[in-house]
Amino acid sequence: VSQRLHYDSASLKPYSVMQAQTDYTERTGDYRLNNQFNVLRELAGARQILKEHGVQMARTKLAESTHKSYMGYMVKQSTFQTLMHDMMIASGARQDDVDGIGAGESTSDNFENNPKLTKLAEVLVEHFER
């Protein structure tokens, strides 16, 4: 499709996908792959958030993505459902939240698995206890 996507896929960034989409449509004039590019950009964005902010934030990003029209087919796939379930467990959700998983949203959203937010909470509590 584009040379921009022919390098290490583990370091793929949403911006690279957007550039590849632009290159492809300018070169071919074909817009039929726009949905696939959009899905790939969402997944690359979630993976980037996972690397930078933790499981909870990435799960939240994917849960928000499920409401986008181009994600409709992906959300119905068993691999996506399994991914959301595994991320729910990894983010420390209660068992009843995991059992009742719908579109990947949880009633117990917290930031236990995000070290930056955990530290921020500690600092804020310490500040206001003085």
Image (spheres, helix red, strand yellow):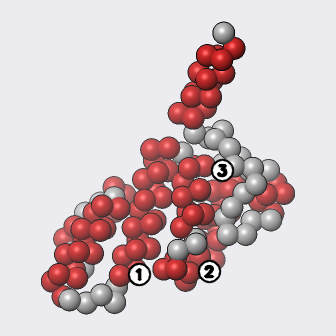
How packed mark 3 is, by other alpha carbons closer than 10 Å (few <14, some 14-19, many 20 or more), is some
* Nearer-N-terminus badge (3/2): 2
- Which residue appears at 45% of the width and 66% of the height? 42
Secondary structure, mark 1, is helix
- Indicate whether 38 appears above or below 45: below
- For the residues carrying marks 2 and 1, which lies nearer the camera in this image? 1
Q: Which residue is mark 2?
A: 76
Q: Which residue is mark 3?
A: 90
Q: Are marks 2 and 1 in contact (CB under 8 Å)?
A: no
Instruction: Name the residue type under label 1.
Output: Asn
Instruction: Name the residue type under label 3.
Output: Ala
- What is the CA distance from the residue labelled 1 to the residue labelled 3? 29 Å
- Front in this rendered view, residue 87 or 45: 45
Q: Position of residue 46 (x, y in %)?
A: 48, 58
- Which residue appears at 48% of the width and 80% of the height? 70
- What is the CA distance from the residue labelled 3 to the residue labelled 2? 21 Å
Q: Which residue is mark 1?
A: 35
Tally of numbered discs: 3
Apparent side of residue 112 relative to residue 72 in the rendered image (left or right): right
How packed mark 2 is, by other alpha carbons closer than 10 Å (few <14, some 14-19, many 20 or more), is few
* Nearer-N-terminus badge (2/1): 1
- Front in this rendered view, residue 124 or 20: 124
Considering every residue shown, the one lying at the far left of the view is 27
Instruction: Name the residue type under label 2.
Output: Lys
